[in-house]
Image (tube, rainbow, N blue to C red):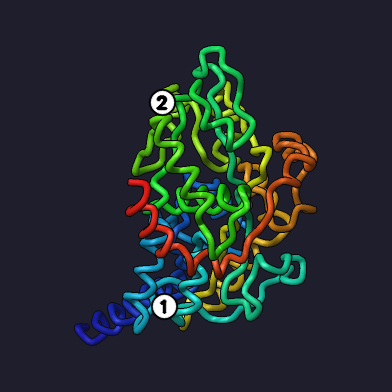
Amino acid sequence: MKSLVHCVLRAATLALTLTGASAYAQNAICYNCPPEWADWGTQLRAIKKATGITVPADNKNSGQSLASIAAEKGNPVADVVYYGVTFGIQAAQDGLVQNYKPQHWDQIPAGMKDPDGKWFAIHSGTLGLMVNVDALDGKPVPRSWADLLKPEYKGMVGYLDPASAFVGYVGAVAINRALGGTPDNFDPALKWFKDMKANQPIVPKQTAYARVLSGEIPILIDYDFNAYRAKYKDHSNVEFVIPAEGTIAVPYVMSLVANAPHADNGKKVLDFTLSDEGQAIWANAFLRPVRPEAMSAEAQKKFLPEAEYARAGTVDYVKMAEGQRAFSQRYAKEVN
């Protein structure tokens, strides 16, 4: 009798183990896939429905994700990772990710992907001015980087710290390019920030979205998708402006982690993010999909016209990444 019970228990344990293993095999771990950011919540549900693969939400940011895959290099946990382009470049240089060219690879523009597939863009954000029109107290909406230096906007302009926050550094690169600088010459941007000090800018250390909606920061140098979210989701009187002198678009990229424990599942996840359905989800969250043909006409109406976006160029993102530390050091010394 004991032998029979023992056999039944062993069979049950084995069944549970196999069931658990099967379920685990249907998972893929993504670092930095927070449900509230870029509507990853909808994306993860769509991945589950289309592929059967469960991808748990993850609230790391780009820097934390890079640090995690570096710390876990000898025993990887994540299968895929999502981050700002400079972090993807760093991960590739450090040997933390592997080559994979997903479906629709050929439709990703050059410059928006590593030639070998170590990282590739899935969508992008364009930097500009997020303006709470009501908080301007009747002043005109600024239309250029030069406008922000005018005394009438004193104490009204905000931007994240260019020496420490990625979006702050993106702002510096955009301003520098617009004012005639190069990746090797940040003098124009540094002069602009020095001049801006007379206007008493607001320089928060963390995201300032709520402070714009409240009117505490009437003008914030930020991405287009945050401005559109404020306008169409939170129904605030917010306008997005692409400065007259120009700006840059910055890709958000994904990679397949080196020696990923569920690489096949990870590849399916990456394929889906570039599918028509996956790209449409990004567009509906106000991010410009890397495959614009996947954007619906309804979503397109919520973006500024293409003639406005013509002023948003790209840069050499590898050089952008390489120059970040040197710029931060100069900014801390010359501006702060």
Label drawn at residue 18: 1
Residue 241 visible at all = yes
Q: Helix, strand or loop at disc 1?
A: helix
Residue 26 visible at all = no
Give, as a three-letter code, the residue at label 1.
Answer: Leu
Rounded to the nearest whole Å, what is the CA distance between mark 2 and mark 1? 62 Å
Residue 6 vertical placement versus 327 (above, below): below
Residue 13, horizontal then vertical, whole percent: 32, 77
Q: Count all numbered tags in the image, as a single digit.
A: 2
Q: Residue at x 53, y 78 (%)?
A: 263
Q: Residue at x 45, y 48 (%)?
A: 168
Q: Residue at x 41, y 32 (%)?
A: 198
Give, as a three-letter code, the residue at label 2.
Answer: Gly
**Residue topped by disc 2:** 155
Residue 18 vertical placement versus 333 (above, below): below
The residue lying toward the viewer, choosing from 11 and 134, is 134
Identify the image quadrant of the N terminus: bottom left
- Select label 2 or label 1 by which is in front: 2
**Residue 272 placement, left or right of 185:** right
Residue 25, horizontal then vertical, whole percent: 48, 74
Q: Find the residue positioned furthest to the top.
A: 138
